[in-house]
């Protein structure tokens, strides 16, 4: 049964990677993804796909990995000490997109599955994943669209699902050392094994399959907006926050490094350029200052304007 679960999820994830890359490359219209495969000495491997210097994406990646081993990495077993001593398989697709135009938001997502086994005991499995949006010059119309698609993806699984995973996303993507959120959120879920495998797997597919519907309309609305040095400088400054989160707080980065994954693929999520400036604050009333209101938890599906 465990191997059947793994086979079904892996088949879906490989197809999802293909579909994401095809659609994103078509949207870029200039660059394409290049692929390299890798093997992990302890077991498993993956295929990494990266797009760079396109008409839309300055850098982006869509990575598939399947790693396995005799014992769970510390990042997983520390939170689940009852699983110590179990072998594991972890399979997932993760993606991150860094557009060049500062008016087009950065976006990240992943869907993953982990199964831990031990002779004589039932396998333990769970799903995790989600997606989030990181605008630099946010537009309420875009943020509402993003959350509307997320809500609709969750709706068949219960009215409480979207509010729960939206709140979890707000909490997770927080730079605790700055008491600041990375973006405007979306969905985040982990340890999902309630209601049986088929229901949980269906939810993972609903999340993965809804990403393009959530993201591409925003891209199409914003990619033609003019920008200059001011907007670029602010984009690079805020990308610094993105780097800080991924290196300090992100569980996936830590799991990948601790499990002996391919470092080049794990750090694919980093933007190609970023900057830090000591003690900088935006001018009051400026477009850059408006971002702060959007970084607060908010009911995006209401009619309320952030900061009003």
Image (cartoon, rainbow, N blue to C red):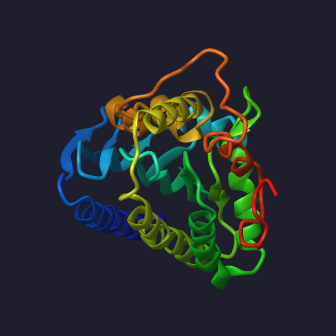
Nearest the camera: 196 or 237?
A: 237
Q: Does residue 85 appear in the picture of this structure?
A: no
Which residue is situated farthest in the right direction here?
Answer: 308
Q: How many marks?
A: 0
Does 89 sit above or below residue 176? below
Nearest the camera: 228 or 111?
A: 228
Taking the spot 38% from the left edge, 66% from the top edge, the residue there is 220
| 81 lies left or right of 85 | right
x and y percentages locating residue 203 in the rendered image: 57, 73
Taking the spot 32% from the left edge, 31% from the top edge, the residue there is 264
Which residue is situated farthest in the bottom direction here?
Answer: 156
x and y percentages locating residue 274 in the rendered image: 45, 28
| 145 lies left or right of 33 | right
Nearest the camera: 263 or 22?
A: 22
| 22 lies left or right of 286 | left
Question: Quadrant of residue 164 in the image?
Answer: bottom right
Q: Does residue 54 appear in the picture of this structure?
A: yes
Taking the spot 78% from the left edge, 74% from the top edge, the residue there is 160
x and y percentages locating residue 249 in the rendered image: 63, 33
Does 241 sit above or below residue 51? above
| 4 lies left or right of 200 | left
Does 184 sit above or below residue 152? above
x and y percentages locating residue 154 in the rendered image: 64, 76
Q: Quadrant of the C terminus?
A: bottom right
């Amino acid at each position: 049964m465990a191997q059947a679960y793994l086979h079904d999820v892996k088949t879906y994830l490989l197809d999802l990677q293909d579909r994401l890359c095809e659609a994103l490359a078509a949207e870029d219209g200039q660059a394409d993804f290049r692929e390299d495969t890798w093997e992990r000495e302890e077991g498993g491997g993956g295929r990494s796909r990266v797009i760079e210097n396109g008409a839309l994406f300055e850098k982006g990646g869509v990575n598939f990995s399947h790693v396995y081993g005799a014992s769970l990495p510390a990042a997983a077993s520390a939170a689940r000490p009852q699983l110590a001593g179990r072998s594991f398989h972890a399979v997932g697709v993760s993606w991150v997109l860094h557009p060049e135009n500062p008016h087009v938001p950065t976006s990240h997502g992943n869907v993953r599955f982990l199964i831990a086994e031990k002779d004589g005991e039932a396998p333990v499995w769970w799903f995790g994943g989600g997606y989030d949006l990181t605008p630099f010059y946010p537009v309420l119309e875009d943020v509402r669209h993003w959350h509307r698609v997320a809500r609709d993806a969750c709706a068949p699984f219960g009215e409480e699902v979207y509010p729960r995973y939206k709140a979890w996303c707000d909490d997770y993507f927080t730079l605790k050392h700055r008491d600041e959120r990375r973006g405007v959120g979306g969905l985040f879920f982990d340890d999902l094994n309630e209601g049986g495998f088929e229901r949980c797997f269906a939810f993972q597919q609903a999340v993965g399959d809804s990403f393009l519907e959530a993201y591409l309309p925003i891209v199409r609305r914003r990619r033609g907006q003019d920008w200059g040095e001011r907007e670029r400088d602010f984009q690079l400054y805020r990308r610094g926050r993105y780097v800080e989160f991924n290196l300090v707080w992100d569980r996936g980065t830590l799991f990948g490094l601790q499990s002996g994954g391919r470092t080049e693929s794990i750090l694919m999520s980093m933007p190609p350029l970023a900057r830090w400036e000591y003690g900088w604050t935006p001018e009051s009333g400026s477009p850059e200052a408006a971002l702060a209101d959007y970084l607060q938890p908010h009911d995006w599906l209401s009619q309320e304007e952030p900061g009003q």
